[in-house]
Image (cartoon, grey):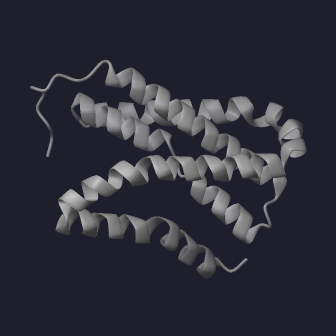
Amino acid sequence: MPLGEIFITIAMILLVPLLAGAAVKHRFPQLALQLSRVLQPLSIALFLLFVVLAFFGNYTLFLQFIGLIFFWVLAHNGLAISAGFSLASAFGLNKQQRRTLSIETGIQNSGLALGIIFTYFGGLGGMAIIAGWWGVWHLVSGLLLSSFWHFKAPSPVEKTVS
């Protein structure tokens, strides 16, 4: 497993879209807004499709391992969300920033994990099951948490930390 190739893959999956998006948003803010309305739901749909295909390709392994990993993934995600919120609170960030940091901390890049597993490890079933369940749960927990907080919007008069 060539380490350099893995770093290039990570850069292609994470950095290229991030930098391209930042450049488009900086130079063409209206276009970025229009594209985000299409690309955000599309990216979620593509990720779900990726997870579903991995799930059906490894269904028997899923049944074999889900009992071993189910609660560990939930516990890890809960700890990450709590740690992000606590760290943001410790640094005096406002409510919106605390929420953002907790979701960003709690929702790791499961798509990247699946990509690396299938590219460099031949889609090893146990690894794919963990990353797949991780991805599904992160989508569920992120959507639940953001929906909950959506209805408990922070006060618009809160100061922001620069």
Residue sitting farthest toward the top = 152
Depth order, front residue of 103/72: 103
Reply above or below: 156 against 125. above
Q: Position of residue 157 (x, y in %)?
A: 9, 26
Q: Position of residue 68 (x, y in %)?
A: 81, 34
Reply above or below: 161 against 53. above
160 lies left or right of 67: left
The quadrant of the image that shows the N terminus is: bottom right
38 lies left or right of 98: right
Q: Residue at x 11, y 32 (%)?
A: 159
Q: Position of residue 95 (x, y in %)?
A: 25, 28
Q: Residue at x 49, y 39 (%)?
A: 106
Reply above or below: 28 against 148. below
Q: Position of residue 55 (x, y in %)?
A: 77, 46
Q: Residue at x 48, y 51 (%)?
A: 42
User: Where is residue 34, by image quadrant?
Assistant: bottom left
Reply above or below: 137 against 155. below
Viewer can see residue 101 = yes
Viewer can see residue 90 = no
Q: Residue at x 33, y 38 (%)?
A: 100
117 lies left or right of 46: right
